[in-house]
Amino acid sequence: MFKHLLIPILVFVLSANFVFAEAPTTTGFIPGSIWYSHEPLVEGDTVKIYTAVWNADDKPLSAKVEFYDKNVVLGTRDVVVDKSSLKDVSISWKVTSGDHTISAKIISSNTTTGGKSEKVVLERTSTKSDKIFVPVSVKNAKDEDTSNTKVVKDQIAIPESLTTSIADTFSPVEFIRLRVDQDVDTSKEKTKQEIDQLEGQGSITKEGVNTGQKPLDATERPIAYIKLFLLSIVGFVFGSKLVFYGLSLLILFLVLRFIYRKIRHRR
């Protein structure tokens, strides 16, 4: 019931022009999209490195994805993503000890229209690099692997039970949360640029010569700061899983309590 009530609300938020005007295309890698079939990583183990590609277009997308450890190519995979769909892609990797920087890039992409293939330019062609350290494994008397240090990571590991399929890993609600968070970040950057431009309007040089720019409207600067403040609040809510789902549960509870009281009073 929670998902059924929340998804329409979030879709409405996504479509609101006053917050997310001129949102960029979302086709390409999803945010923070590098994870492994199991963790912690142990030297000598063979694991799968996963990422995921989202196609927001109304046509199927074909892409070639390369996986890297720093500048070393670990493997290349072809993936076809149906319209308005999310699909995972992975390679097998034998873990070695030491420092690693795992990432993926879309090196080519095209869509098919009327049987003809056309190249397309995507905005999200690179994942965020995942920096990890794998310690040297030590064999004990029972030939069980132990590690002399813990694996150091700069992001939260995805549970092994959730890495078999992207459909299980990213629920519709979670994907919308990530998308809103990224769109808010983009809007915040644009608003900061607008404020910088407003600060520079109507400036006068030391010689008393006006720069020739249009005088600043007294209302433009406060409105820009209010917009940035509101975007920061929305970004804080959607950027934190704890805050987002906690607030969502609270809203759901209040809605259900309101409905219950209405029904009770009618009796």
Image (cartoon, rainbow, N blue to C red):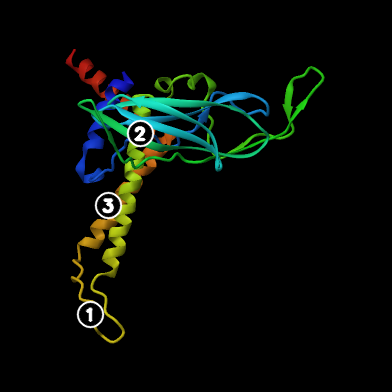
Give the class, few, some or many, for how many residues have Cα within 10 Å of label 1's Cα (few <14, many ≥20): some
Instruction: Give the mark, 2 or 3, whose residue is nearer the N terminus.
Output: 2
Question: Mark 1 highlights which residue?
Answer: 210
Instruction: Give the mark, 1 or 2, whose residue is nearer the N terminus.
Output: 2
Q: What amino acid type should be assigned to the residue bearing mark 2?
A: Arg
Q: Could you say whether the residue bearing mark 3 is in a helix, strand or loop?
A: helix
Q: Nearer the viewer, residue 211 or 114?
A: 114
Verify CB contact (< 8 Å) between mark 2 and mark 3: no
Verify CB contact (< 8 Å) between mark 1 and mark 3: no
Question: Mark 2 highlights which residue?
Answer: 177
Instruction: Give the mark, 1 or 3, whose residue is nearer the N terminus.
Output: 1
Of badges 1 and 2, the one in the foreground is: 1
Q: Give the quadrant of the N terminus.
A: top left
- Judged left or right of residue 192, residue 140 is right
Give the Cα distance between marks 2 and 3. Answer: 20 Å
Question: Mark 3 highlights which residue?
Answer: 227
Give the class, few, some or many, for how many residues have Cα within 10 Å of label 3's Cα (few <14, many ≥20): some
Q: Residue furthest top?
A: 267
